[in-house]
Image (cartoon, helix red, strand yellow):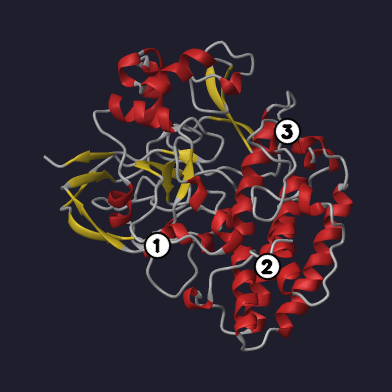
Amino acid sequence: MSPEVSAPPPSASPTLPDTTEALLERFRAVRAFSERMCEGMEPEDFVIQSSPDVSPTKWHLAHTTWFFEAFLLEPHGTGYRPLNAEYNYLFNSYYNTIGEQFCRPRRGQISRPTVREVFDYRRYVDEHVEDLLRSADDSERGARIREIVLLGTHHEQQHQELMATDIKHVFSINPLRPSWRDAGPRETSGGVPELEWIEQPGGLVEIGYEGPDFHFDNEAKRHRVYLEPFALASRLVTNGDYLAFMEDGGYDRPELWLSMGWAKVRETGLAENEWERFDKPLYWFRKDDRWWQFTLSGPQPVDPNEPVVHVSYYEADAYARWSGARLPTEPEWESCAAPEGIDEGVFSDTFTFHPRALSSTAERGRLHQMFGDVWEWTSSAYTAYPGFQPWPGSAGEYNGKFMANQLVLRGGSCATSRDHIRPSYRNFFYAGDRWQFMGIRLAKDAR
């Protein structure tokens, strides 16, 4: 194990839960939530890898456990012995300073350790983490231990979201189109409010995180950005909105598309797997002369009032051009995101894992659905903020080295934990990706 493995230095320490017991409670709750997500799954469900971007559920459960082992127990535990030294190779994702990694597109080929053995691995590491955390005193070492435990819980919450998106892809390619969990009766939406443009004055604004609470290194430093006056759409783009784009030949009009997006449309137009075709959102299909979509509760009719989900940046940008608007920039989005809006969204805590239609009686003249439901594409490249400093050691590989050729998404989704998101949170994906819960909010320049 590399001696470079470390967490943020004490000088950058986040505010930790008030007591060791409070941090232990968070650790247990996050670890238990991952396993609660697996209730009802069969062993066969844990091991499938349906595309190179998707990881088996078993791998996520093991990798999040390995994270505590590699970043906490081995460098900071006294006399800790790994349950199996080979797990460092099998379950290391991309930390080159720690060691070599098993080939990502082949994770579904690993039959051992078994699902049962992975759960045993979780029990083994959890026991050692709790013992180490209880022993942490007020020294610099004790502070470091608590920081890594907190970081590890947020890292696991990110993988909980990936577990939901990955098992959705796994189940979607099965001709039986199984249900991961019964979400219960869907709410009947009575229409959505007409889209309004909420004008913003622009000017000098501040974005980025500044404060003592937990945040990732890519959210700092807080800095000033000058914005021209603009307007943001009051709500998300709905399925009905997007259907109008499709019915107007949106996927057949090259003038609407970025060059690489149009190439994607042409390349995948005849793909054998219907999910891979760029002629509709991911997971949509035709049945009985109507549109359906695959959800984690099985196939459901497309509700025109729900937010459109599983669209790539290319599709979001083409839709925005078709509608005479554009996508917001990252600073525009954050300058409008009030923390109190987090309470309005649909998050993973509901266990529905599907966005909800905005109420037809929603208050007019204000922004809705800024948090939860779907990640919102921005037009901003994922790059470093002024003054950005990656965490030292192996933790510095967490975000900084991916700052090339990706775009920022904001706001969280129905697969995000409510206590994991904040206005400054930066997610990032490649322009062609769409298996995450990705959606659209429009912006435009002020008149």
Is 28 positioned to the left or the right of 81 in the image? left
Measured as percent of width and height from the top left, residue 231 is found at 21, 45
**Closer to us: mark 1 or mark 3?**
1
Q: Amino acid at mark 1?
A: Ala
| Numbered circle sitting on residue 220 | 1
Q: Position of residue 42 (x, y in %)?
A: 83, 42
* Residue 277 versus residue 338 in the image, above or below: above
Earlier sequence position, callout 1 versus callout 2:
2
Gap in Å between the C-alphas at discs 2 and 3?
Answer: 28 Å
SS label for mark 3: loop
Q: Is residue 351 visible?
A: no
CB-based contact (under 8 Å), mark 1 and mark 3: no
**Residue beneath the point at 11% across and 39% down:** 447
Residue 433, image x, y percentages: 52, 33
Quick one: label 2, few (<14), some, or many (20+) residues within 10 Å?
Answer: few
Q: Secondary structure at mark 1?
A: loop
Q: Earlier in the sequence, mark 1 or mark 3?
A: 3
Residue visible at 30% across and 42% down?
Answer: 328
Q: Which residue is mark 2?
A: 29
Q: Which residue is mark 3?
A: 178
- Residue at image x 77%, y 49%? 89
Packing grade of label 3 (10 A; few <14, some 14-19, many >=20) is some
Q: Quadrant of the N terminus?
A: bottom right
